[in-house]
Image (cartoon, helix red, strand yellow):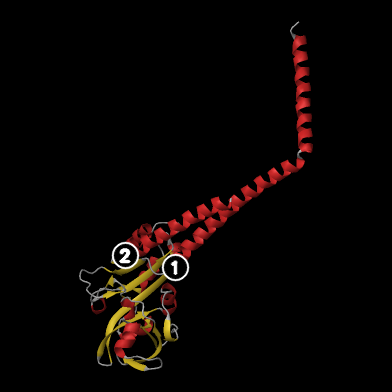
């Protein structure tokens, strides 16, 4: 007795469903152009948002890498109490005249830290003084290819940039003025002869004062083979904090003082944050 109504309800429900499907198909056929346009618009919006998000993320990572390569954001010096002498704002004192020093072995140890892939450029230096035209001069031995990569703001006023392993000099603007240097001039430093290859434009920092020579030649001139006073490191920080790298380096080099260049790190974080906000706003506006 109760089965018949159930069958009638099922049949009625089936008819209603068929009617709804038919109405839907009719509406689709009737408004096909509008529906197609709406579907296309939604597809374009979704594709645009996804594309812009992916592009902004890739640009964000690339931007951070490029920013990290511009200058050093980590400095390594020997552990010494008194450092009145400074180079590029980093206190060095009489490092070049004492037995406290870093070595080239420290660079190899530094490259074994857990996040070694984040070490973009390692620029070692040896620093000393020498008589130049009867006046005291600051002489900095550098690995020219790496130094020029980490000091991207260096611009030549005249001459050319030296290559590694040569007897050429790159003079800071202050040193050139103080010692009246000119390109092509031959100078004698502790008995070894060098030629002025280029003179840098003034940057308004302690970098203007030294003359720069090849690292190996400087070690030979100062009688300190394999020794270093300072290691500047450009660190990629796009996927890890600089303090993490500093901690790992300190563990590998317990005899050295490893410091993050705070001003560089803070400026980097500020610029990267502004870029991230800009990328998000751009994605929303474009979408």
Residue at coordinates 30% horizontally, 79% vertically from top-left?
A: 127
Q: Residue furthest top?
A: 1
Nearest the camera: 123 or 5? 5
Quadrant housing residue 143: bottom left
Residue at coordinates 39% horizontally, 81% vertically from top-left?
A: 201
On residue 8, which mark appears?
A: none
Q: Nearer the viewer, mark 2 or mark 1?
A: 1
On residue 258, which mark appears?
A: 2
Left or right of residue 2: residue 253: left
Left or right of residue 5: residue 246: left
Nearest the camera: 38 or 258? 38
Q: Is residue 250 visible?
A: yes
> Mark 1 or mark 2, which is nearer the start of the sequence?
1
Q: Mark 2 falls on what kind of element?
A: strand
Q: Residue 37: percent from the left, percent from the top?
A: 71, 45
Quadrant housing residue 82: bottom left
The local crowd at label 1, few if under 14, some if 14 to 19, many if 20 or more residues have their Cα within 10 Å, is many
Residue at coordinates 77% horizontally, 10% vertically from top-left?
A: 4
Q: Residue 173: percent from the left, percent from the top?
A: 35, 83
Q: Residue 103: percent from the left, percent from the top?
A: 33, 73
Residue at coordinates 47% horizontally, 58% vertically from top-left?
A: 275
Q: Mark 1 falls on what kind of element?
A: helix
How many numbered marks have been drawn onto this rendered protein structure? 2
Q: Is residue 165 visible?
A: no
Q: From this view, report whether residue 139 is shown above or below residue 64.
A: below
Quadrant housing residue 15: top right
Q: Residue furthest left?
A: 82
Look at mark 1 in the image and give the residue it sits on.
69
Q: From this view, report whether residue 184 is shown above or below residue 275.
A: below
Distance from the alpha carbon under mark 2 to that under mark 1: 18 Å
């Amino acid at each position: 007795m109760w089965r018949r109504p159930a069958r009638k309800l099922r049949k009625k429900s089936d008819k209603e469903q068929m009617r709804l499907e038919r109405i839907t198909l009719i509406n689709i056929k009737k408004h096909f152009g509008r529906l197609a346009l709406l579907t296309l618009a939604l597809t374009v919006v979704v594709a645009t948002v996804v594309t812009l998000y992916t592009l902004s993320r890739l640009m964000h990572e690339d931007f951070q890498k490029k920013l990290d390569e511009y200058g050093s954001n980590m400095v390594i010096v020997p552990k010494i109490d008194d450092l009145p002498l400074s180079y590029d704002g980093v206190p060095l004192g009489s490092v070049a005249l004492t037995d406290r020093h870093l070595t080239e072995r420290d660079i190899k140890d530094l490259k074994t830290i857990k996040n070694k892939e984040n070490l973009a450029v390692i620029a070692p230096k040896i620093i000393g003084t020498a008589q130049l035209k009867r006046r005291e001069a600051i002489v900095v031995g550098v690995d020219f290819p790496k130094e020029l990569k980490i000091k991207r703001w260096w611009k030549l006023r005249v001459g050319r940039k030296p290559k590694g392993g040569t007897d050429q000099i790159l003079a800071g603007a202050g040193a050139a003025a103080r010692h009246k240097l000119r390109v092509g001039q031959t100078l004698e430093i502790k008995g070894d002869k060098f030629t002025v290859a280029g003179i840098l434009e003034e940057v308004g920092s302690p970098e203007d004062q030294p003359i720069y020579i090849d690292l190996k030649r400087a070690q030979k001139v100062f009688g300190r083979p394999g020794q270093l006073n300072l290691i500047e490191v450009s660190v990629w920080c796009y996927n890890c904090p600089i303090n993490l790298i500093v901690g790992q380096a300190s563990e590998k080099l317990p005899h050295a003082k490893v410091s993050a260049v705070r001003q560089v790190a803070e400026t980097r974080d500020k610029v990267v944050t502004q870029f991230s906000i800009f990328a998000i706003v751009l994605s929303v506006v474009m979408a």
